[in-house]
Structure formats: structure tokens, C-alpha cells
Amino acid sequence: METRDLDYLLAIEKHGGIGKAAEALGMSQPALTKAIQRVEAQAGLALFERTANGVVPTPPGALFLARARRIALEYEDALKEMHAIRGGEQGMLRIGYSPTVPDTLVLDACRQLLKERPAARLRLRRRLARELVDLLVAGELDLIVAPEQDGDNGELSFVELFCDTLSVLAADTHPLHRKRNLRLVNLVDQEWLLPGPTIPLRQKIDAAFERQGLPAPRLRVETDFGSISLLHLMRDTTMLCVAGTESFGTLEGLRALNVDTKELDLYRHIGVIFRTQAYLSPLAQRTIVLLQERAS
């Protein structure tokens, strides 16, 4: 099998049809069909099946494609390593970071890297942690700075930078500030600004209420992205939200409620995440060191 066969397979999966994949690859449809037939003959099984909307992987094909993606990433990493050897430390570094990570931590490290490596180029992405992990696994990012993720099956490595605890925030004038050691039952009637149900933070909060036998938080605003700018919505309201250390001091008029951490534990680990088997360029390795220095 040739490495380009992997590109053919992945293109068909991506575009959902041989015709669209052939157009994207700049080749004829019969040539692509013949290439896939050759791979299927080697595998001894059909890898795709036709549907009313195009083609989809068969169950064996889905397993084959999962390995094909890993092989393609390994091949790409090998080329990156050879280019780094040939060109020294020159190159592109692609970094992603979560909105819940302090901007200054990442940007200060990047600024120092640019001073030390005049030939270096950076590509920055600011996304939710789950999106960043998907981009990292797909090989579109080299490093991400985000909360530690569960269930990566050893595919990802984590270098801890710091730990912190998220807090429940409310406007300074909120009556709950007059109470100490708040319990979740005291928050049942409150309105919340929270991320969507697929976000781990939201799931953690919902689970905490459920463990106490309480109804889920009453949503007033739900969002599918994280940003400190969302805290502007909290002004002059009685809504509650959850935010991290990067939010303190950003807006006047908001402060943390004294919520019992035994009932709502929002402790988290923040660090650098990268693919365990990926090639880490000298730029990537130096960036990790710079992030560690700033976090300490």
C-alpha cells in the first residue's frame, strides 16, 4: 500500500462520496474507485458501502480508517522531524488554549518565544477545551493549554502548570453574599448563566445538584462558548455563573459566593496537553518550559 492510499480513504470519509473526494483530490472518479478497490482487495473486506446520500464506512472500514488516521499523523510527524533536523529550530508552532486559561500565561510565553526564536511563526487558536482536544487529535494543533481531560486512553500526555478552583460569581449586591457556607439548596431558586450541556463544567454542576436530590440549575442564559466578556451579562442582574482565576479583577461589581466545596467541588488542573506519540519540535519543547516558568 502507498501512503497516498491513506489520503484517498480519509478523503472519501470526509466528503461522504467518491465523486466529491475525487474532485477535492484533483483526480478522476474512476481512478479513485480503482484505488479503493485495490486497498479493499489487500484488506480482504469492503471498507465502504453505498447509501442514499453517498458512501459510509462499513464497521471493518471504520476500524481501518481509525488506524489510517493514526498512520497519516505518524507520517506527518516524521516529515516534521526531518524538516526540523534540516532547518534547525525554524518552523511553525500551532498552539490552542481554552478561554478559561489566563491570557497572560499563554501570551507572555509566546512573546518570550518570539524574542528567542526570530524565525519562529505561531498560529494561535482559542476554543473550548473539547474542541481543542479534537483539533489536537486530528493533528491540526501541536500543543494545547487547557484543563486536564478525562478518558483519553493514554493517547494524550499532560504536563501540569497549575491548579485552581472555579468559583460561583454573583453581583456585589446579590443578597446571597450576606450568607456564609452556602449550600446548593440555597441556590435552587437562582437563575444561572452556564455553558451548554455537553461542556464538562456544566455536567459537573448538574451532577452536584443531582447528588443532593435537587432540581437542575435554572438557566437564564446558556452559551456554547466560554469568554470573560460573557460576564458583562451579569451586571445589574441576580444571575449566578461559574468562572476561574482569569475572571477576578476583570470586571468590577462581581465577586465569589461562599459555597460549600463539599457539595460543589470545582477544583481543576490546568496544563499543556499534546499527543503522546507525536513529534515535539524544539519550538514546542521550549514553549512548554516557558509556560512552566510563568505558571510557577
Image: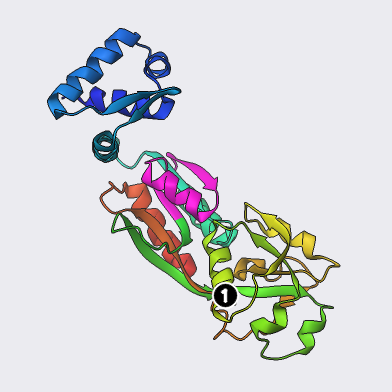
- Residue 91: x percent and y percent? 38, 38
* 44 horizontally vs 188: left or right: left
Is residue 83 something one can see in this rendering? Answer: no
* 65 horizontally vs 227: left or right: left
Give the residue at x 37% y 15%.
22
Give the residue at x 41% y 25%.
16
Range of magenta residues: 118-144
Which quadrant of the figure has residue 89? top left
- Residue 49: x percent and y percent? 32, 25
Q: How is the image coloured?
A: rainbow
Q: Nearer the viewer, residue 48 or 269?
A: 48
Q: Which residue is mark 1?
A: 210
Q: Is residue 296 above or below residue 175?
A: above
The amino acid at mark 1 is Glu
Q: Is residue 133 magenta?
A: yes
Quadrant in which the N terminus is drawn: top left
Which quadrant of the figure has residue 234? bottom right
Is residue 46 something one can see in this rendering? Answer: yes
Give the residue at x 81% y 77%.
172
Q: Residue furthest bottom?
A: 180
Q: Nearer the viewer, residue 95 or 257?
A: 257
SS at mark 1 in the image: helix
Q: Is residue 114 magenta?
A: no
* 134 horizontally vs 202: left or right: left
Q: Is residue 219 above or below residue 287?
A: below
Which quadrant of the figure has residue 201? bottom right
- Residue 149: x percent and y percent? 42, 62
Give the residue at x 58% y 61%.
100
- Residue 70: x percent and y percent? 27, 41
